[in-house]
């Protein structure tokens, strides 16, 4: 039950006092070349950019965000084709392209150095941002995803006779967006309920009904279900980018790679699928956590990280 930094229930009590709820955060919209990116932001101090995965949007950070905002300026984006951001005409959801969206938001805010934390499908854009803008990303945190190009993602998404309901067969299924949309459209809520249950630590209680309804509303808008699957369709492109980047010039800034204890583990898998991106990386497991670490409280203090788990 240890992560770098102080693990303390007293700290948990302190940080939960006088927080500004995520729903009260200010809105931001940045018009870029082919998309309009929406974000929520709050807090004072050094900036930290939070990047969500599938099938979520900035609401992912409703618990972590307000805690971080006590000491940081927190920017929680909606990735292209997700939440309140718009859908690109060219269906480009590659990590490199999405990282350009993130850079556009940071440039708009005149931020020249930031912490970055990505979860799930947000890991690719976060890592691409760090590879392409090394002086911009001071420290990188990435969780619960195996980067394409490392071999770990390819192994996990390759159909196997051993697959069952709890396997990650959706990695292959979602990579054909038209087919996935055909079978799931009209059953978005059922899909999401299963998806949150599938890799959770606490089963159906991993997400509230209010948040399940919100995610259903967002992903049921015209085009947004297919947009989410678009991220899975880009794994071949992503694999080439990350393999070349890792082979030619690994990241030198500190990288923390995290996995949920009952999801992305053991620690050797976390290192192989994520930690391999940098020469100054460390890998940890979040105790009593599944895939949905957005309800674990991760506090950045230098690059020591204290984690007080609540639910995932």
Image (cartoon, rainbow, N blue to C red):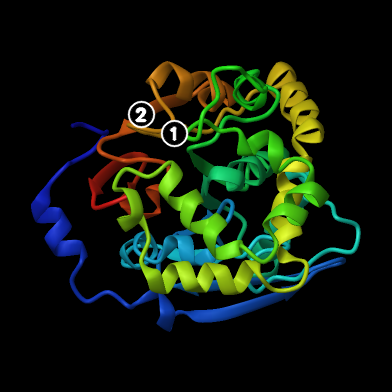
Residue drawn at x 76%, y 34% as measured from the top left: 238
Based on the displayed image, in which of its 4 quarters is residue 156 positioned?
A: top right
Residue drawn at x 59%, y 52% as measured from the top left: 54
Residue 166 in the image: above or below residue 292: above
Residue drawn at x 77%, y 50% as measured from the top left: 93
Query: Marks 2/1: CA distance?
Result: 8 Å
Disc 1 crowd rating (10 Å Cα; few below 14, some 14-19, many 20+) is: many
Number of the label disc, if any, that sits on residue 134 = none
Left or right position of 285 against 157: left
Question: Quarter holding the N terminus?
Answer: top left
Residue 75 in the image: above or below residue 295: below
Residue 114 in the image: above or below residue 37: above
Based on the displayed image, in which of its 4 quarters is residue 232 positioned?
A: top right
Number of the label disc, if any, that sits on residue 284 = 2
Quick check: can you spot residue 103?
Answer: no
- The residue at which mark 1 appears reads as 256
Left or right position of 233 against 130: right
Q: Position of residue 109 (x, y in %)?
A: 63, 70
Q: Nearer the viewer, residue 188 or 298?
A: 188
Residue drawn at x 72%, y 63% as measured from the top left: 81
Q: Nearer the viewer, residue 130 or 148?
A: 148
The answer to whether marks 2 and 1 mark residues whose Cβ atoms lie closer than 8 Å is: yes
Secondary structure beneath dot 2 equals strand
Specify which label sits upstream in the sequence, 2 or 1.
Answer: 1
Kindly report which numbered mark, 2 or 1, lies closer to the viewer in this rendering. Answer: 2
Secondary structure beneath dot 1 equals strand
Q: Nearer the viewer, residue 60 or 275?
A: 60
Q: Position of residue 31 (x, y in %)?
A: 78, 74
Q: Position of residue 147 (x, y in %)?
A: 62, 30
């Amino acid at each position: 039950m240890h992560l770098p930094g102080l693990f303390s229930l007293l700290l948990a009590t302190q940080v939960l006092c006088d927080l500004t709820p995520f729903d009260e955060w200010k809105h931001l919209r940045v018009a870029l070349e082919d998309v309009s990116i929406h974000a929520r932001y709050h807090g004072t101090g050094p900036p930290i950019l939070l990047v969500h995965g599938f099938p979520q949007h900035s609401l992912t950070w409703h618990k972590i965000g307000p805690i971080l905002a006590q000491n940081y300026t927190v920017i929680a984006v909606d990735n292209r084709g997700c939440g309140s951001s718009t859908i690109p005409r060219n269906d480009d959801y590659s990590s490199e392209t999405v990282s350009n969206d993130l850079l556009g938001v940071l440039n708009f805010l005149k931020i020249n150095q930031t912490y970055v934390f990505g979860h799930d499908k947000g890991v690719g854009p976060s890592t691409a941002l760090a590879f392409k803008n090394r002086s911009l990303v001071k420290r990188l945190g990435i969780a619960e995803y195996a980067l394409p190009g490392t071999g770990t993602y390819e192994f996990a998404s390759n159909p196997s006779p051993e697959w069952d309901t709890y396997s990650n067969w959706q990695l292959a299924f979602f990579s054909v967006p038209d087919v996935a949309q055909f079978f799931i459209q009209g059953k978005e809520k059922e899909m999401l309920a299963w998806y949150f249950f599938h890799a959770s630590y606490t089963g159906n209680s991993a997400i509230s009904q209010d948040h399940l309804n919100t995610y259903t509303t967002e992903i049921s808008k015209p085009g947004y279900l297919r947009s989410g699957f678009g991220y899975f369709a880009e794994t071949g492109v992503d694999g080439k980018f990350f393999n070349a980047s890792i082979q030619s010039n690994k990241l030198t800034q500190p990288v923390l790679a995290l996995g949920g204890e009952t999801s992305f583990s053991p620690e050797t898998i976390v290192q192989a699928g994520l930690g391999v991106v940098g020469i100054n990386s460390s890998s940890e497991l979040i105790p009593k956590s599944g895939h949905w670490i957005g309800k674990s409280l991760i506090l950045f203090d230098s690059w020591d990280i204290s984690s007080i788990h609540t639910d995932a």
